[in-house]
Image (tube, rainbow, N blue to C red):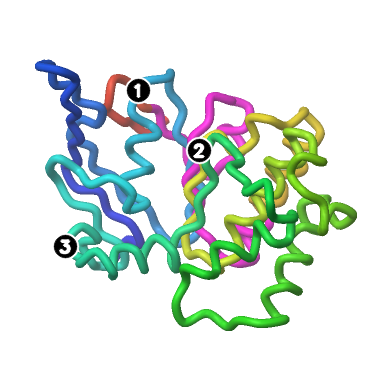
Amino acid sequence: MSQIALINLVKTFSVGSEKITAVKDVSLNVEKGDFLSIIGHSGSGKTTLISMIGGIIGPTSGTIMFNGTNIYSLDSDSLSGYRSNKIGFMFQFASLLPILTAKENLLLPLIFTSGKPSGPSNEQKAVELLKMVGLGDKINTYPSQLSGGQQRRVAIARAFMNDPEVILADEPTGDLDEETEADMMQFFKTMNEEKGITFIMVTHNTDLARQTKRQLKMTLGSIKEL
């Protein structure tokens, strides 16, 4: 059984009287421990696709199975639990809370998780993750005191705080210089290989995409393996 199975997935949006199909009949199997990249032009449906996988927006039709369960058959509380306990999100923007330090921004998502240990162990985990992304000297620093690239690395570290089974990453290295981007890609590979975390990464960067185990391309809502 695949960890994630997309079956005839369709997502249509209404814009005035017009209907736009962002994702067209996509079927895809993702195994545990996969590391796949999805490339494609803006508007090709990449972000919509991973948003559906993450339980953020529902499909118009089709099915998303996670470990044998149709996630959109779950009630709202169970779907929220799926998002907060199983998935780590890296969005296009860092979206850090300015009133919280780097460490506190990492701890914030744990408020919404269930069945996870709390207390000093989480603070230690946050510190270790910040060190892993090269920000060991910025633990108590506020976002306004960080560069855009440093804020991005805080957001990357935050995605791992809930011990996710799957990372959904939307242009995760967009604000980074070439050297830091290479460092973060190595970090992703380490977490994938050592922790068995599944990665689905949306990127415009074909050099990054070539470093993943599988490469797919979206064009006008359809997907194919490269």
Residue of label 3:
73
* C-alpha gap between disc 2 and disc 3: 25 Å
Residue 118: quadrant of the picture? bottom right
Residue of label 2:
170
Q: Residue at x 66, y 82 (%)?
A: 119
Crowd band around label 2 with a 10 angstrom C-alpha radius: few (<14), some (14–19), many (20+): many
- Residue 195 appears at what percent x and percent y? 60, 67
At label 3, the amino acid type is: Ser
Q: Name the outermost residue toward the right.
A: 137
Q: Residue at x 24, y 64 (%)?
A: 76
**Quick one: label 1 or label 2, which is nearer the N terminus?**
1
At label 1, the amino acid type is: Ser
At label 2, the amino acid type is: Asp
- Residue 6 appears at what percent x and percent y? 25, 48
Q: Name the outermost residue toward the front.
A: 99
Q: Name the side, left or right, on which 81 lies relative to 134.
A: left
